[in-house]
Image (cartoon, grey):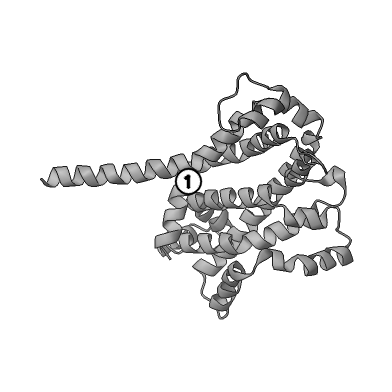
Amino acid sequence: MRIKKVTSKRFFIYLILSLFAIANAYPIVWMVLNSLKTADEFALDRIGLPEGFAFQNYIDAWNTANFGSFFVNSLIVSLVSVVITVFLGALAAYFLSRFQFRMSKFIYGFFVFGLLVPVHATLVPMFILMSKLGLLNTHFSLILPYVAFNMPISIFLLVSFMKSFPKDIEESAIMDGAGILKIFWSIILPMTRPAIATVVILSFINNWNEFVFALVLINDPALATLPLGLQNFAGQYETNYVGQMAGLTMALVPILIVYLFLEKELVKGMTAGAVKG
């Protein structure tokens, strides 16, 4: 009876998880299938399978909408922001979690408070600041806000993870003659890999999909990112839906690559950040 009860419970859990997975996967599958339809097929049937494979939609999306330029701009902004966020976040988290000093709790609370700040409520002051600094229509006008608004969650996760490390590790390294930065770079940073993977994925997804800051701070089409470029498929009187679906599918590929590459570390990092610290 006990075995049957456990089996039934496991079956119920797997069923719920399977339904949840299907509900999340369906929009992606629907988007990919519609990206392979012609405009007439899409207009007549938006749910059914495509009669053929209209790969020309991808070619048109890449060439006609200048998708390559938008892709490169998004890669530059997203990757540079992630690197800076991880480095500064890990360094700040190391000192906040491994050292006791007078203002440590206040500084940590100040960073975590950033999670409560509505990002887009800062658009006007951000625009004024970037204008006075002469950074409008540059990559840095996006990189700096992306780093700033990804820093709170990064420090929160990394501090929670680093607090779980035993002090004996650092004491042994100090006895061997290692300095603070050497301990951070050679010991703490490799041990924090699961949490760092979490930060990388969350930051990259946020940066890659961000639209409002890019819309306000970038007016030069040569510097536009992918979310801005996808607007080119929508005209005043009509929208190229199949081209837009093809563009969205191509925009999704880098996120899937990053996620699949770091998926195992993401689970470890999120679990540690939730129960430790």
Give whichever of 61, 267 is nearer the camera.
Answer: 61
State the image quarter where residue 256 is shown: top right
Q: Mark 1: which amino acid?
A: Glu
Residue that protrudes farthest toward the front in the picture = 44
Residue 80 against residue 105 in the figure, above or below? above
The residue that mark 1 highlights is 265
Residue that protrudes farthest toward the bottom in the picture = 102
Where is residue 15 shown, x and y percent of the image? Answer: 33, 42
Which residue is found at the position 55% from the left and 28% from the top? 48
Where is residue 216 shown, x and y percent of the image? Answer: 80, 58
267 on left or right of 131: left
Give whichever of 251, 186 is nearer the camera.
Answer: 251
Q: Residues within 10 Å of mark 1 (few under 14, many from 20)?
A: some
- Asked if one can make out residue 185 in the rendered structure from this viewpoint, the answer is yes
Residue that protrudes farthest toward the top in the picture = 52
Q: Quadrant of the N terminus?
A: top left
Which residue is found at the position 58% from the left and 52% from the top? 202
- Asked if one can make out residue 165 in the rendered structure from this viewpoint, the answer is no
Q: Quadrant of the C terminus?
A: bottom left
130 on left or right of 56: right
Where is residue 242 shown, x and y percent of the image? Answer: 69, 32
Which residue is found at the position 62% from the left and 61% from the top? 151
- Give SS at disc 1: helix
